[in-house]
Image: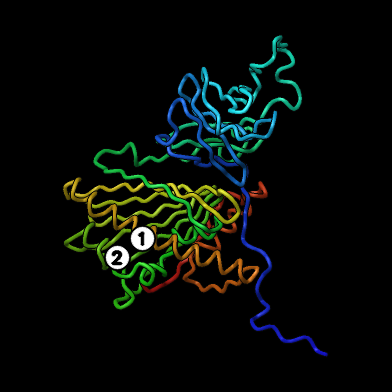
Amino acid sequence: MNAPAPLWSTSTVKRKNVVRVVDAWYVVCRAAALPAGRPVAAQVLGVPLALWRTKAGAPAAVLDRCPHRNVPLSLGRVQDGELECRYHGWRFDDRGRLTAVPGLPVVDDARLDGPGRCTEGFRCVEADGFVYVWLSDKDPASTATPQPTRLTQLHAAGYTHIRRSMQVEGTLHSTLENILDVPHTAFLHGGLFRTAEKRHTIDAIVQRGRDGVVAEFVGEPRPPGLVGRVLSPSGGVVQHWDRFLLPSVAQVEYRIGDENHVVVTTLCTPVSETVTAMHTLLSVKTRLPVAPLAAVAAPIAWRILAQDKEILKAQTELVDRFGGERFSSTSIDLLGPHILHLLKKAEQGALDEAIVREERFQLRV
């Protein structure tokens, strides 16, 4: 008897575009979310972490597992700048070395940090209001990303800055592509940002280099919807760039005239294969008063992020349901394929030569 025909196309790929770039600085939390005197649990690339601040106030990160009896160290407390396990009081420094076992009547310091008694420590730094962690055993200075990406707009005069962090159900690649994808905005965000009813044909110039890709959009009018009206009530031609920078930075930049400038920078962190943390910095410079602008612009931005979160969740659930992916792209899927190429090269530790590839496309927005 012949086997029944499948009820859907068998072209589904039995895998996901999951890329693990280990040699990278990832945001683990906002600096304000790591108070002195209390540990915090986190996860990056599936690795559970315990974070705290040392006596000097510097962030520290170790594997969130006490080697004594497998209890999460993030349940413990901070004592004299070190992390103390809640179960038996074993204490660890910022490198994961065991420094104290309170129950021992005689302590041989030379044996405290012997094999099996320490937990793994990770490099951890604070920059631009975020805490970053480095999971690789390589020295960052020997890699393509020796330091975290700096947020230069934070140090420019005249900008209002708003931060927001959230987690989405989506691979790192799908999340980055969503942030930088223009064609979906008229449909998923219609009324807030662009509209499907009134379209314009514009040019897109895509340049890919060794560690990133940027799309510049030429001839784009002020976007219809609330976002455009808030940024530039009088209209005008838009200067618009979408950028991806290794390992996981997505940036959208708009200039409308000389007085209106918006930069949305999202630092993405792969929490697991299908969960990504988004740490977003919204930087706005405009002639409008700051307080009313923030009151209007922030809720719009967060609503757009919520819509993206919803669609990424639906996408991820369907990929799981079908057991893999099936993608079909056109020329206006500008950055997604480039992002995946760059991520895979970084995963392999084999970045392209330092040359710039440029392509030009047309699309309707």
Amino acid on which the number 1 mark rests in the picture: Ile
Q: Quadrant of residue 66?
A: top right
Q: Is label 2 in a helix, a strand or a loop?
A: loop
Task: Mark 2: give few (<14), some (14-19) or many (20+) Cα within 10 Å.
Answer: many
> Residue 125, relative to residue 151: is it above or below?
above
Q: Quadrant of the C terminus?
A: bottom left
Question: What whole-number distance in Å separates the C-alpha atoms at marks 2 and 1?
Answer: 8 Å
Verify CB contact (< 8 Å) between mark 2 and mark 1. Answer: yes
Residue visible at 19% across and 46% down in the picture: 291
Q: Quadrant of residue 127?
A: top left
Q: Quadrant of the N terminus?
A: bottom right
The numbered mark at residue 304 is 1
Residue toward you, 131 or 345: 131
List the residue tagged with mark 2. 192
Q: Tell me residue 353's x, y (percent).
A: 61, 50
Q: Tell me residue 362's x, y (percent).
A: 42, 72
Q: Tell me residue 109's x, y (percent).
A: 70, 12
